[in-house]
Image (cartoon, helix red, strand yellow):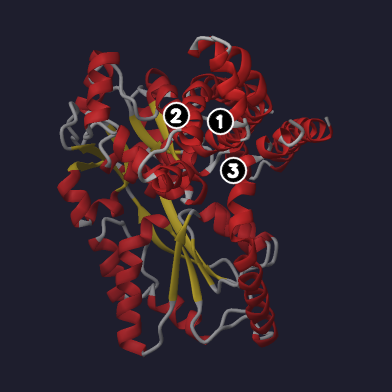
Amino acid sequence: MDWTAFGLSLELALWTALLLVPIGAWIARELAWRPIAGKAWLEALVALPLVLPPTVLGYYLLSAFGGASWLGQAYQAIAGRPLAFSFNGLLLASMVFNLPFAVQPMQRAFEAIPQEVREAAWVSGLSRWSAFRRVELPLAWPGIVSSLVLTVAHTVGEFGVVLMMGGNIPGETRTISIAIYDRVQAFDESAAATMSAMLLAFSLLAIGIVYALSDRRRRA
Amino acid sequence: MSFFGAFAAIGPRRAVTEGIAARGRSVFAAAIAVLLCSIAESPPVRAAAVPVVAAASDLQYALSEISEAFTRATGSPVKLSFGSSGNFARQIMQGAPYELLFSADEDYVRMLQARGLTEGAGALYAIGRLALFAPKGSAVKADAEMRDLAAAAADGRLRRIAIANPEHAPYGRAARAALMHKGLWEKLQARLVLGENVSQTAQFAISGSVDAALIAYSLTFSEAMKRAGSIAPVPHEWHAPLAQRMVLLRGAGETARRFFAFAQSAPARAVFERHGFSLPPSKG
């Protein structure tokens, strides 16, 4: 059992959720309420990581993070170390491939808040911020929780992108799914079996939470 | 408020799947139908008209050339599938329909032989060589004795070096041995980037994301690689020989047998040599 890898996966998942869910909430809210020209294309862009093969994402991310790209060079100049094959690089990649998982549940939740409720909040003299905090946020809460859990679960489960651009560095980019692949490659069946079973339990638990939440709300 | 939960939960997959569900169903049915037909038609014996040959990824250029020469000489095509030798070994144990395996080392062939999946012990066909590669723009220079690499490791110019995973890739084991020989292995631990196989390691190097890489010499003969950086073969006595063995798998057909023989012929040996492989003693 590779605890370092499991810990790294969890760390990556939590950071991704922490950074991506607020950004995702803003995107979701804009997409839900603001009339934007070409909205369908924006939504398509957000959904893209769902349908693109991880190989395509991984290929682009690896080229984008390398020393030959402006992003790679800018990061190198600021941080003093390369972005490719680093935890921060993986975090950035993770925020890209999790975008639909973070945005879509929250967008549905914001869309479901009736126009009259928002208008009532404005008429009551609530400022924008307090309307968001006291009316929108509580109403959209189940969607936000879904986003959080899905982002965490999907990050822990992501394999293809990490294999393509991670570089398998222990404690830095070797996530649990890569560690499992590694053990299978090394014909170490028992370690692979243990870690697989653990990941299965973890994923079931995470998805179970989302369904349980949605069930309770539906009945309420 | 009761419908919020329904909207909020499991958004993405459901949103996407529901949208295409109606069309998806008929496509699915068609796919099943095609699948059933193909099962009904598949022949009971393994030997196919065009045999599938599994080959280690360091052979990408050399073996493609050899198979073209083989097809020109005999009129029989073969299908080449490149990947990691370990993956192929596992797939063969699960009954994958390959007829011939060109492994990057001998251990996988022995493992398959011990399980009775091969026809005999096969034959050595090439000795792989390791090379140091430094991408264009890297602060490190590739020289035959890895002198600049050692200096760069000491003065911090070398931030990342890519090798294949030594736990299961033969070239990874050779890279580890060479770095140990230079006394660099311990020092470079934190700077290693591990490729899943030697091809991916080369890909990391071409992308310029690392300062240096230890890869298969045979992969550095492509135009793309020559343009991407400087290359120096590593002295072969710095690591255990990368003896590459091929073996016919049980149930192999006539074409696979002829290709097995062809890969040991003088023209094939010349191709291996031209792509940076050393050669095992000829059987005559």
Q: Are marks 2 and 1 in contact (CB under 8 Å)?
A: yes
Residue at horizontal 35 percent and vertical 22 percent from the top? B184
The residue that mark 1 highlights is A175
Q: Secondary structure at mark 3?
A: helix
Q: Amino acid at mark 3?
A: Pro
Three-letter amino acid code at disc 1? Thr
Which chain does the numbered disc 2 sit on?
A
Q: Residue at x 58, y 35 (%)?
A: A111
Instruction: Tell me: A117 left or right of A23.
Output: right
Q: Are marks 2 and 1 on the same chain?
A: yes
On the image, the x and y values in percent for residue B149 come to 24, 26
Give the Cα distance between marks 2 and 1.
10 Å
Say which quarter of the image contains residue A82: top left
Question: Of the numbered discs in the image, which one, if any, rests on residue B12?
Answer: 3
Between B206 and B212, the one lying in front of the other is B206
Q: Which residue is mark 2?
A: A90
Q: Crowdedness of circle 3 by 10 Å Cα count: few (<14), some, many (20+)?
A: many
- Relative to B260, residue A2 above or below: above
Query: In terms of secondary structure, where does tag 1 sit?
Result: loop
